[in-house]
Amino acid sequence: MKNRFVVLAGLIVCLNANSQNFQDIENLLLASQEDQTLLFQQYFNPLVKSVNYGMASGWSHTAKTHKKLGFDITFSLNSSFIPSSAEVYSTSGFNSITTSSDFLPTVLGSKTDETISITLFGQGSIPELTTSFTAPSGIKEDLPLSMVATPSIQLGIGLPSKTDLIIRYVPTRTNKNTSIGLKGIGLKHDLLQHFGPADKIPVIDLSLLVAYSKYSVNYNIQKTSNLTGENQQALMNINNYVVRLISSLDIKVLVFYASIGYTKGVSDLRLLGTYNLPYNVADTSEQVMVNVTDPLEVNWNNKSTSANVGISFKLPGLRLFADYTLREYNSVSLGVSLSLR
């Protein structure tokens, strides 16, 4: 089961070697240095956002904390709905790029045969260089219900002072061209204990959750690259921070819960290795090769407030839960938790 979960995670981060759509992303390096960063930012932006929002979900399905040394093991699938506006990006605002379309697909958009033409304008003795390539396609056709799902496996342990320690961990595994691992840590603290009589109400709980998690992805570009070179790889780190105020109402076999919160994502993508970039010299039959090393680093910063509502069904030693979250990309979480105390 663990192996299946890790493979699913690789699919979700969308750098899976089985997808032909990502074998052309290195061609974006053919654009001017000024345009490269913007191209990669816009192409991957909805993926980074949706994974970040998924990482912020599923941390807790009740405000109630464990008794000391009580614990739970939770499996959840957190799926973000992709708005249609995130399926394309505008081709305006680039200096070296021309295309017949005003919009191109992002990584979560549709397939395309659109050609991107590149012109690097020369200065002085440096000639004008040109080239062209087919724009990278998106994977919309491979996404069920236009959703990106982010799985998580976590352990919650009861500490003193009505506080839970939550640990997320998926060991780094390799699925063909892609290696991926997940780590995370969180604390959930009971707030009602600090308000005297309020702590005596038997069915109501209120807690504060703070958590951090990180996806680390290594994609081997070299195996499918259209550009000659050595040690070509893409390293992506997706970091997520979340603060959430959780309330819950515990009635026999049902728990109703709701929360408001804030999440911040800090992510980066680095293309490492050497790449030989082929160009034509304008108005001649001459071709030149430009060699670059470790050519790109792209950063994303995403912030969003959120509110969610959910329900949990209590069975002996087992809980089933589902919730819906309102934010920039709305999401739904489903999961199961094995718990004691």
Image (cartoon, rainbow, N blue to C red):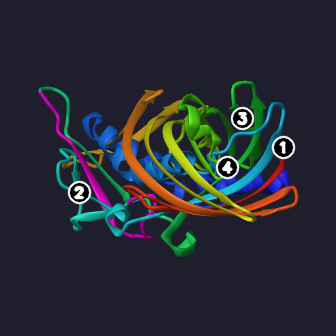
Residues at marks 3 and 2, CA–CA distance in whole angstroms: 42 Å
Badge 2 local density, few (<14 within 10 Å), some, or many (20+)? some
Position of the C terminus, as image quadrant, is top right
Badge 3 local density, few (<14 within 10 Å), some, or many (20+)? many
Q: Is residue 54 above or below residue 156?
A: below
Which is in the foreground here, disc 3 or disc 2?
3
Residues at marks 4 and 1, CA–CA distance in whole angstroms: 16 Å
Residue to which mark 4 is pinned: 202
Q: Which numbered disc, 2 or 4, marks the residue that appears first in the sequence? A: 2
Residue to which mark 2 is pinned: 91
Residues at marks 3 and 4, CA–CA distance in whole angstroms: 28 Å
Residue to which mark 3 is pinned: 167
Which is in the foreground here, disc 2 or disc 4?
4
* Coordinates of residue 11 in the picture (x, y in percent): 64, 57
333 left or right of 166 in image: left
Q: Residue at x 67, y 44 (%)?
A: 64
Range drawn in magenta = 106-123
Residues at marks 1 and 3, CA–CA distance in whole angstroms: 17 Å
* Coordinates of residue 122 in the picture (x, y in percent): 17, 34
Which is in the foreground here, disc 4 or disc 1?
4
